[in-house]
Image (cartoon, helix red, strand yellow):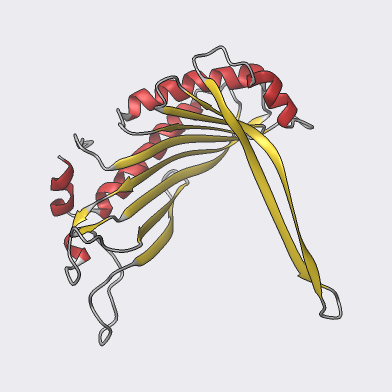
């Protein structure tokens, strides 16, 4: 049975659909299709993308680094600033900012905007579907307290080392053989606060590679299964003591 937390620590929830675009599709096409939106959003700014390259010659001499940047998409916001839509030729990303409502509301809005996208920039195929949730756990802890009270399977500090953890980064990429989906699970802490709070970031990125027609309803069935994997990863990461903080 699916659990619900009234005060879930979600700072951003997003649905991301990547596509194989029509040949030659580029930013000017995105600008033309979405530069004057008529579906309840407004253009906030463009999305730049930069590249950086360096290397060595065959005789071992360094090659001067080069960099380049280009505009690749548009970022649009809902009037209440709660939803952020990013449009690129090869992907659509919808983010929900705080306060998070629920999965159903996010999925309904994503489906609506997906319909707009495929009508204006029809792609060849859907190649990747993802649901990503970024959580800020804000654990009530002080230096020397055990993170295992709140987090399952956190790698333990080696014996003989100081045991007061001030920062960490732990990342797994996991595969679900039942439905072929994957999840990247990242736990990170920069530092404890002076108020006795550990702002641990729990980032869960669940996704599946696909080859689906853009109109295929299986897109949304797969997305539901990806969401279930995301939920299992979230509740499997936190102890009951941690979950009590968000009920």
Furthest residue toward top: 38
Q: Is residue 160 visible?
A: yes
Q: Is residue 232 left or right of residue 70?
A: left
Say which residue appears at 33% left-offset and 34% top-offset.
Answer: 98
Is residue 19 visible from the viewing direction of this image?
A: no
Tell me where residue 11 appears, x and y as whole percent.
34, 41
Residue 58: quarter of image: bottom right
Depth check: 171 or 208 in front? 171
Q: How many marks?
A: 0
Place of residue 112 in the rendered image (x, y in percent of width and height, measured from the top left): 48, 18
x 46%, y 25%: residue: 110
- Of residues 186 and 142, the one drawn nearer to the viewer in this rendering: 142
Residue 228 position (above or below residue 234): above
The reply, left or right, for residue 216 in relation to residue 163 is right
Q: Position of residue 50 (x, y in %)?
A: 67, 49
Q: Residue at x 36, y 43 (%)?
A: 230
x, y percent for residue 60: 81, 80
**Residue name at image x 47 percent, y 43 percent:** 207
State whether residue 222 is above or below residue 65: above
Q: Residue pushed farthest bottom?
A: 160
């Amino acid at each position: 049975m699916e659990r619900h937390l009234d005060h879930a620590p979600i700072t951003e929830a997003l649905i991301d659909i990547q596509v194989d675009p029509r040949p030659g599709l580029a930013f000017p096409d995105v600008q033309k299709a979405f530069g004057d939106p008529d579906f309840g959003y407004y253009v906030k700014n463009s999305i730049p993308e930069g590249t950086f390259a360096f290397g060595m010659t065959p005789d071992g001499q360094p090659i001067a680094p080069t960099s380049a940047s280009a505009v690749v998409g548009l970022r649009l916001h809902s009037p209440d600033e709660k939803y952020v839509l990013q449009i690129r030729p090869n992907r659509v990303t919808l983010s929900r900012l705080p306060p998070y409502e629920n999965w159903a509301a996010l999925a309904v809005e994503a489906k609506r905007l997906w319909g707009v996208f495929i009508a204006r920039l029809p792609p060849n195929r859907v190649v990747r579907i993802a649901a990503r949730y970024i959580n800020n756990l804000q654990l009530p802890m002080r230096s020397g307290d055990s993170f295992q009270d709140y987090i399952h399977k956190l790698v333990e500090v080696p014996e003989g080392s100081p045991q007061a953890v001030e920062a960490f980064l732990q990342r797994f990429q996991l595969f679900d053989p039942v439905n072929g989906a994957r999840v990247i699970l990242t736990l990170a802490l920069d530092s404890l606060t002076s108020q006795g709070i550990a702002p641990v970031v729990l980032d869960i990125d669940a996704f599946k590679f696909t080859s689906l027609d853009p109109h295929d309803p299986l897109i949304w069935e797969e997305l539901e299964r990806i969401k279930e994997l995301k939920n299992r990863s979230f509740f499997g990461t936190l102890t009951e003591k941690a979950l009590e903080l968000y009920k």
